[in-house]
Image (spheres, grey):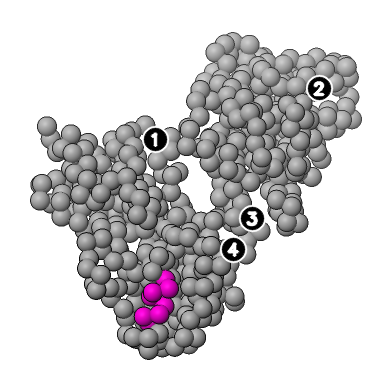
Amino acid sequence: MKKGLVYLVGAGPGDPELISLKALRALEEAHCIIYDYLADKSFVQGRDCEIIYVGKEGSSHTLTQDEINTLIVQKALEGKTVVRLKGGDPFIFGRGGEEAEELEARGIPFVIIPGVSSFYSAPAYAGIPLTHRNFANAFEVVSGHRRADADEDDDVNFPEYNPEKTFVFLMGMKNLKYISRKLIEDKNFDPQTPVGIISWGTRPEQRVITAPLSQIADEVEKAKMKPPAIIIMGGVVTLRDKLRWFDNQPLFGKKIVVTRTREQASRLSKMLTILGARTIELPVISIKKSSDMSPLHEALKNISRYSWLVFTSQNAISIFFEELFLTGRDARSLGDIKIAAIGRATADELHKYGLRADLVPPEFVAESLLKEMQKQDLKGSKILLPCAADARHVLTQGLKDSGADVERIHIYTALPPESADQGTIDEVKNADIITFTSSSTAKNFFSIIESTDAELASIGPVTSETLRGLGHTPHIEAEEFTVEGLVESIIARCSKGTN
């Protein structure tokens, strides 16, 4: 059998957005992913390939390094494209060099994809630059962890003291007290040298403690801070209070679940991530286009007879125009028909097709749209309403009561996904906030997860009422019934320290 290809990939320090494009491409190509404890789990969730965890947490190892080497070789000899996914950079205290040597010895082709290392990215997220003209013109990175097979006398390779240098120790938390003492006693480090400890750097779980070198071990013990963490020491640590940015963001540390469709989730996720949140995407809606589009096609043949075309969702717009184009027509066939859209996002979706909504209600719910449309003379008007099969009938009935001839055509159904990734579900159970952007997301979410201790954030009163009907109390409700409004309400809630 032809030998496979092995990618030795750096996953970065923790923030999943810090992985490289080349690394993401390798993950897409992989037949097998062998990943570490510090590689973010989102990189492997939902992937249709063999996934093997070989993480090492302190002294607890799933496999020895020799066994990991053997596993990588075995999978490559099966002809598979293998991604060996490692936290940080594979060649910086990551033993990637040893794995590459093993592959070279067996004649297996490999590619090295560097990653962002924690030794400089974690301090950056803590507001501590490694170099600064007023403090340090060089830095030194040291392993604070002895080899398992080392003699007791084979200690950390302690650096010589230099007040114009920054020192970073990786894997040194268990030896922190010993390292501090040896630096002061044997290397003449000033006991007042500023030290920062950064655990889970670049992640929402990030914690930072600063103290003088002589006191740092005691402060870490008091705070019960555990690995993984890096130790940084030098004058640059004093810049932390001035330059801290990551843990000053309004949603820092919050784990927030996004339940929108996979296609729509990215916009909300991006907004939350920029504000410091860790987003967990659990799409609980799958849009299924109706199998019988003949009613819509019949309406399109006679489209000129309609006075109004009403859209209540972005999904309705995209499916409507997909079918319009399939029939050989385009936006010009809509002629003088007036278009109503239930909200800003729905109206923005129209822009993709070169159209502007004639009517967008001040509140983005069916009741508000109905109220605005009733200001028109609707008697005898023919209205086309392409919508979801489970859409509420408030608008349809209200327009009919106003004398309009409403043709409601079901063009899609919002279904629960066929399956949900167990790893994602486990993350959701530890979330702080779960967002709901429609009644369907609420219904489908609680069909997957029966209960949660997280706070529930609703996009508006209709979704809130659905949550209550399911026996759950919404803690947050958007004042403006949009994704932007939902985010603003989450910020307001978190700023009060109630979550």
How far is the residue under mark 4 from the one under mark 1?
31 Å
x and y, in percent, of residue 255 in the image: 59, 48
169 relative to 277, above or below: below
**Pointers 4 and 3 in contact (CB under 8 A)?**
no
Q: In this view of the protein, which residue sits in the foreground, 378 or 372?
A: 372
Residue at image x 69%, y 42%?
Answer: 455
How far is the residue under mark 4 from the one under mark 2?
45 Å
Q: In this view of the protein, which residue sits in the foreground, 3 or 357?
A: 3
Q: Which quarter of the rendering shows the N terminus?
A: top left
Q: Which residue was labeled with disc 4?
A: 247
Task: Mark 4 or mark 1: name the one nearer the start of the chain.
Answer: 1
Please, what secondary structure does the residue beneath circle 3 have? Answer: loop
Q: Amino acid at mark 2?
A: Val
Q: Which residue was labeled with disc 1?
A: 47
User: Based on the displayed image, in which of its 4 quarters is residue 13 positioned?
Assistant: bottom left
Residue at image x 25%, y 49%?
Answer: 64
User: Based on the displayed image, in which of its 4 quarters is residue 71 positioned?
Assistant: top left
Q: Which residue was labeled with disc 2?
A: 394
**Pointers 4 and 2 in contact (CB under 8 A)?**
no
Residue 181 among magenta residues? yes
Magenta stretch, residue numbers: 176-183
Please, what secondary structure does the residue beneath circle 2 have? Answer: helix
212 relative to 263, above or below: below
Circle 2: is it few (<14), some (14-19), or many (20+) Cα within 10 Å? few
x and y, in percent, of residue 229 in the image: 44, 63
x and y, in percent, of residue 53 in the image: 34, 42
Task: Mark 2 or mark 3: name the one nearer the start of the chain.
Answer: 3
